[in-house]
Image: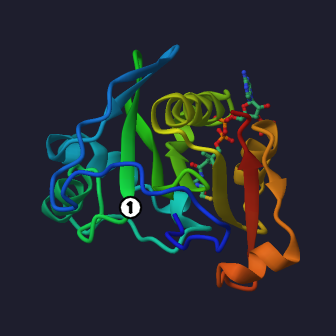
Amino acid sequence: MNPASPSLPSPPTIDTRSTTDPHPPAPRLHAPPLILEPLTADQAEPMFEVLSERSLYAYLDDEPPASVAALREVYRRRERGRSPDGSELWFNWLLTLPDAGWVGFVQASMTDPQSCWIGYLLSSAVQGRGHATRAVARMVAHLRSHHGAERLLASVERANRPSIALLERLEFSLASPEEHAMHGLGPTEQLYVRFLAR
Ligand SMILES: CC(C)(COP(=O)(O)OP(=O)(O)OC[C@H]1O[C@@H](n2cnc3c(N)ncnc32)[C@H](O)[C@@H]1OP(=O)(O)O)[C@@H](O)C(=O)NCCC(=O)NCCS
C-alpha cells in the first residue's frame, strides 16, 4: 500500500480525537461466503502460514513475515488503527471462508476522504473465484458509508494482471500521467483511481 497522498484540496481530517488514541475497532463485515474479521494481534498465528506463501509476493515490495512473533508485532501496530503520528487511519480486515479458514486480507490507509489507498491479498488455493473482488468491494462500501471515502487509490505493478483485473472489475481507471507523477511510484508501477459518488 502506498501511503503517499495527492495534492488535491482535501477536507479536514476525519477524526478529531487525540492523535495518540487508538482508533475504534472496525466492525466485522460480511461478503458471503467470506467474513472480514477486523485484524487483531491474536490472528498472527493462523495468518503466518497464509502469508508464508512466497509466490504471493511476486509483485509486492513486501516479503513473507520472518516469524509469528514478527507478524504479531506488525499486527500489534496495525490494530491501533492509525499511524503513530495520527495522520492516517488504518483499516485492516482478515478474510475467512467457512471451509478454508484464514485466506487473506484487505486493507486501506486513509489520510482524508480524497486519499484512501487500498491493498489486498488472497491465498492461491482460493483464487479465481471472485473472493478478492467481493472482499474489496465490501471494504470499499464500508469506507464510503462509515468514513466518507471519496477517492480510492491503488498502486500496482504493470505485470500484476490478476490485481489489475480486480481493479478494473471494481471500476478503477488508470490515473493520468500527471497524477501518477505526483506519487513517486516506480517505473514499473501503475496508479489506479476510483471516485466514489456521494
Ligand atoms: C490480486 C489477487 C487478490 C487477485 O486474486 P483473484 O483470485 O484473481 O481475484 P478474485 O478473487 O476477485 O477472483 C477473480 C477470478 O474469479 C473469477 N470469478 C468467478 N466468480 C466471480 C465473481 N462473482 N466476481 C468476480 N470474479 C469472479 C474471475 O473471472 C476471475 O478469474 P479469471 O482470472 O480466471 O478471469 C491475487 O492474485 C493475490 O493475492 N495476489 C498476490 C498479492 C497481490 O499482488 N496483491 C495486489 C497488490 S497491488
Q: Position of residue 21 (x, y in %)?
A: 15, 54
- Left or right of residue 18: residue 33: right
The count of marks equals 1
Name the residue that disc number 1 marks: 88
Of the pair 122 and 86, the residue shown nearer to us: 86
Task: Decide which of 67, 96 is in the foreground and name it.
Answer: 96
**Tag 1: residue type?**
Glu
Q: Nearer the viewer, residue 162 or 114?
A: 114
In the displayed structure image, the side of residue 155 where residue 77 appears, left or right: left
Coordinates of residue 139 in the picture (x, y in percent): 52, 34
Establish if 84 lies above or below 166: below
Provide the secondary structure element on which disc 1 rests: loop
In the rendered view, would you say 91 is above or below 145?
below
Residue name at image x 45 percent, y 56 percent = 109
Q: Measured from the top left, where is residue 168 in percent x and y?
A: 81, 44
Question: Which quadrant of the figure has residue 136?
Answer: top right
Q: Residue 155, located in which quarter of the rendered image?
A: bottom right
Up the image or down, 113 lies above or below 171; here it is below
Quadrant the C terminus occupies: top right
Residue 22 is left or right of residue 61, and the answer is: left
